Image (cartoon, coloured by chain):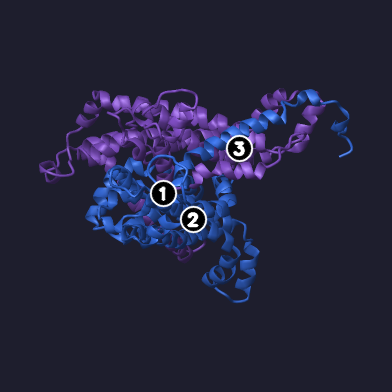
Amino acid sequence: MPAVASPVTRPMAKLRPGPAAAYGVLAALALFALGPFTWVLLAAFDPDANIFVQAPRTLSLENFQNAFTDAGGLGLIVNSLIYAGGATLILVVVTTLGGYALSRYDFRGRRTFMLSILLVRVIPPTATIVPLFVLSKDLGFVDTYHGVILVLASLNVPLGLWIMKGFFDTVPIDIEEAAWVDGANRLQTAFRIVLPLAGPGVAAGALIGFIGAWGEFLVPLVLISDPDKMPISIGLFRAWLNYTNVDWGLLAALSIIYMVPAVAFYVVARRALQSSLAGGLAGQ
Amino acid sequence: MRRIQSWREGLTVAAFLAPALALIGLFTVAPGIWAVVQSFTDRALVGRNAANVQFIGLDNYAQLAGDPDFSASLVRTVVFVLLSAIVGQTILGFLTAYLLATRPRWRLRFSPLFAAIFLLPLAVPEAVAALAWASIANGTEQGFLNRMTGAFGAEPVQWLQEHAMATIIVVNIWRGIPFAMVLFSAALEGISREVLEMSLVDGATAWQQFRRIILGILRPQILLFLMLTTITTFGIFGLVYFLTRGGPGDATTLIGIYIYLQGFKFFEIGFGSAAATVMLVILLTLGVYYVRLMREQA
């Protein structure tokens, strides 16, 4: 762009608030972000951990070993995997189907429909938790894996539909139409041609669904009272309430085990999450 | 995309959408409607009023209006949203996004590293975030926070007892900064470099550029974030309940915790449903505004 004068020729030193100050602010905020994890990190590797922050005299993986061998610890991990895995599977299936239909077909009121789904998203489980409990009890869902899985899956359906529709929108319909001409029917093209192309989108939707179900606190708190069926989130909470009779090292190790998949998936799905939070939701 | 042309196509679309709609309908919409209906009854979770439910008109709402605990929890929630979400998260989230963004004559090293660190508070599950804060806010001398303040000669403080509200506000700012940062970073990336270059060429100071140009361009995104964070913060439960269970006393009983306690501690389904209905009305009103914002930005 030759019309724009090169800005480099002007003395601009006075414009800078100074990167040093910026680094200072960022460092302070980084300490704020990381500081609260101090105890969790130190205690997890400390065989003599307690609730206080202390430098471990020896570092060991004993606590992690215990978390996996201790019946309580392992049970929590397995339960969380069942809930989050099941909810993710259901979420992916229903939002892939729904997202495809919303992306490929137009019908009267489709736009209003999309916006209503968005509106449903603003209703938090907090507002509906009491009826949700009564309903789950009537359906025999309380203290069952399948019931909790269905409820957890439902929480992310509105967001999932929007994400999936957005991804299917990026797969040009021409490809499908060419396949129809070749004699494939609509369902065949959807599965054989569109789904593989929208694969990354489906994966992103799955990650987001997993993160949501994996971290959920209120729903399992209300729907599960059987200690054998509790996920990690409730296990941590109950241990914290117990306070006096707690293996703090094991608890810290369990927290690390619990946060690692969430953080890892978050990093992988960040782009999709970002666009779904910001522009992606704007769709049409 | 094409219009549905036959009833068979219509049926296909309906079948594709049915499972998703069934889940939303059964577990979100129906409980929402049920809450509104029950708010006009004296239903209880257990005991005589569990089986023998009577419609009592607006009695629950009259009782709610006269309940100082309810109005107090509502006011507390507004203060919490205002200080933690609208002020804290927005300002600090914008600040981090702004400092980390690359623009003409501004590029910091280690930006990706900082961004990764800042994401952590949001990436960890709610229960870990709460447990982490619970541990460092420990009221004894050996608590992490007390050691930090103790280094400056301060006495140990029972953070979750003496300053419960302030502590949960700080915790929620901490957890919400990443969300604001992610949204604002995406928005800042979208500003054309030419516009920024030109403003500098025209002799604008960095402050003028920030105020007149960047804030102007980002106004829709800032508004959108304010709506989103207000809505999500209003319905907060796990983070606060884990840390304080609404206490000490009812010092941190936000509206979400109030509803939970009515239902599961006092078993007052009808009365609790009236409180839930108030929350639903507030959130759906905000939600309609949010949907309108989204539609305009489409």
Q: Respond whether the residues carrying marks 3 and 1 are from the same subunit.
A: no
- Residue at the outermost bottom position: A183
Question: In the rendered image of this protein, which colour is used for chain A?
Answer: blue
Q: Position of residue A5 (x, y in %)?
A: 88, 32
Q: Amino acid at mark 3?
A: Phe
Residue A237 visible in the snapshot: yes
The amino acid type of the residue labelled 2 equals: Pro
Q: Percent position (x, y) of residue B109?
A: 71, 40
Q: Compare residues B167 and B155 and report the one nearer the observer.
A: B155
Disc 3 target residue? B184
Quadrant of the snapshot with the C terminus of chain B:
top right
Whether residue A230 is situated above or below residue A40 in the rendered picture: below
Which chain is home to disc 3? B
Q: Residues within 10 Å of mark 3 (few under 14, many from 20)?
A: many
Which secondary structure, mark 3? helix
Residue A115: give x, y in percent of width and height: 48, 45
Within the image, what quadrant is residue B172 found in? top left
Drawn side of residue B84 relative to residue B214, left or right: left
